Image (spheres, rainbow, N blue to C red):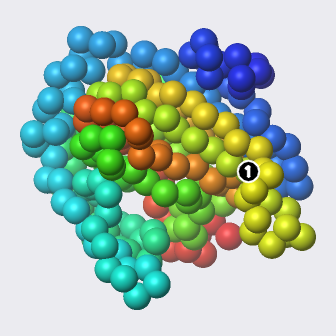
Amino acid sequence: MGSLCMWTQRNVAGDYEISTGPTGVSSLRLFPGFVERAEADWMFEQLAAEIPWGQRTYTKHGVTSLEPRLTCWYGDHPYTYSRLTMEANPHWHPLVTMLRDRIAEVTGVQCNSVLANWYRNEHDSVDWHCDDEPDLGPQPSIASLSLGEMRSFELRKKPPPEDEGDFTYVERLRVPLGHGDLILMFGALQDDWQHRVPKEYHSRAGRINLTYRTIYPNKTAHT
């Protein structure tokens, strides 16, 4: 395992243990340039044009807003997060299927679903969250492929219970993910950390992010 600080600066491939606790080891694995640039170029253009993107609404504190990004779900089972449900969609785009199989071959992680996100510019984002929905099973492995503009992938450690949700002094990490980079989150990471893609202060072109995961339709199947 390497130093995460060195990794974020030099974009070095490898496995990184970012914390250890009662729930286990929280780990990241980085594959910079998983898709070569020339190939990533046409993949981005094809997915931007052909995926049936949509913009969902959410309600928070009684106020309804548009999600600050476009999304599409592929999978035989529905997926609910942030109190919103994306219906089952078995009609996978062939390129999304091909990338799923390529990722499985390299990482050994078999996935049956993917949430595609299109960050159109610097104003699009996803807020702090962890992928810990029951349908994902305990300590899921999630593979995230980036195409397009480099954006910051940020993580923050969840505070201990006695801090009552106060994130002021928690450990934080920042990982720049560029065109064709793949990151794998596994172990206790979803238990102990949150992550986000924040808005940017400077102009950014589009970024497509494919987050592959496995859905267990019967929640008792993995308990």
Q: Is residue 31 left or right of residue 160?
A: left
- The reply to whether residue 194 is in sight is yes
**Does residue 98 lie above or below 37 as drawn?**
below
Quadrant in which the N terminus appears: top right
| Image-quadrant location for residue 73 | bottom left
Residue in the picture at 52% in, 45% down: 142
Taking 127 as reference, is 16 above or below it?
A: above
Residue 185 percent across, percent down from the top left: 60, 41
Horizontal arrangement in the rendering, residue 186 relative to residue 78 (left or right): right
Toward which corner of the image does residue 103 lie, by quadrant? top left
Q: Position of residue 17 (x, y in %)?
A: 76, 33
Residue at 67%, 37% in the rendered image:
173
User: Which residue is found at the position 63% from the left and 65% from the top?
Assistant: 222
Of residue 202 and residue 71, the one placed in the foreground of this image is 202
Q: Residue furthest bottom?
A: 62
Decide which of 19, 122 is in the foreground and name it.
Answer: 122
Which residue has dot 1 on it?
157
Residue 79 placement (x, y as % from top left): 39, 67
Residue at the location (37% across, 22% down)?
180
In the image, what residue type sits under mark 1? Lys
- Residue in front for this viewpoint, 217 or 142: 142
x, y percent for residue 44: 21, 30
With respect to residue 161, does 103 lie above or below?
above
Q: Nearer the viewer, residue 161 or 75?
A: 161
Q: Which image quarter: residue 102? A: top left
Image quarter where the C terminus lies is bottom right
